[in-house]
Image (cartoon, helix red, strand yellow):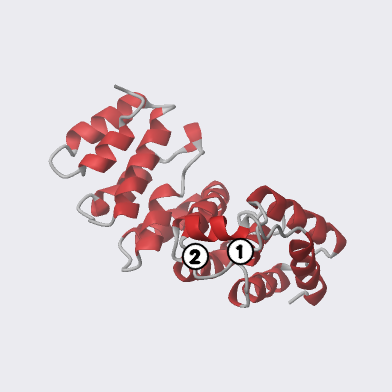
Amino acid sequence: MDAALIDAIRADLRDEADPSRAPGMQAYMKSALPFLGVRLPAVRTIVAAASRRHPPQGLDTLDASVRELWDGAEFREERYAAAALLRLPLARGELALVPLIEHLATTGAWWDHVDDLAGRVADLHDAHPRETGDIVRAWSVDDDLWLRRLAIISQLGRQDRVDRALLADVIIPRLSDREFFVRKAIGWALRDVARVDPAWVRLFVADHEDSISGLSRREALKHLQ
């Protein structure tokens, strides 16, 4: 754990705090943790600057620092900062951090945390496609709904690099899932692919017309009708 890095992030977050924004942010996120009132782009700027002053020395140190910030968070922005550390070049595409990503997803247990982590899994898809494919297939049938959501949205933004067969593999087991956040994720993932391959999305939806939820279908075809 890098105590200097953690202390710098915590201090800079408090310096940036805006108490007038904090209650509204907490209410919007339905968060048990209070907010400082720091907007997410500012959190990421703080983390980047602190990491330049106190660069983490190795993955083990980074992992421990993320866990300390996350598990010891008194304010939600500290959890946003912990996740932002995974954006550092040191962390990008590192399979060793998968247990940490799982920990953040399952303990964060809300859409803002999980949706941010999807970008880190997308990096894993690029760096280690076979291993990451196996990981997200396992997540797609996990009891934890946030891992299921993460599996489905893990290729967002990959455009022509999307593995359509893998996407189908993680969506099809979840077509009967009754969780709103899973159904929404299915529609979102399909809508994202529709930007580069609308024919594939139309065919997928048609082939699963009897099992796809109305919400997922509407989201998937939103820009194609």
Residue found at the very far front of the displayed protein: 20
State the SS at label 2.
loop
State the SS at label 1.
loop
The picture places residue 77, in percent across and down from the top left corner, at: 63, 62
Residue underneath mark 1: 35
The picture places residue 126, in percent across and down from the top left corner, at: 55, 46
Query: What's the amino acid at mark 1?
Result: Phe
Query: Quadrant of residue 21 in the image?
Result: bottom right
Residue underneath mark 2: 31
Query: Foreground: 131 or 40?
Result: 40
- Residue placed at 65% from the left, 66% from the top? 78
Query: Foreground: 79 or 37?
Result: 37
User: In the figure, 187 relative to 73: above or below?
Assistant: above
Residue found at the very far right of the displayed protein: 53
Query: Quadrant of residue 141 in the image?
Result: bottom left
The picture places residue 34, in percent across and down from the top left corner, at: 58, 68
The crowding category of the residue bearing disc 2, from other C-alpha atoms within 10 Å (few below 14, some 14 to 19, many at least 20), is: few
- Residue placed at 16% from the left, 45% from the top? 211
The picture places residue 129, in percent across and down from the top left corner, at: 49, 50
Query: What's the amino acid at mark 2?
Result: Ser
- Residue placed at 21% from the left, 40% from the top? 214
Left or right of 10 on screen, residue 177: left
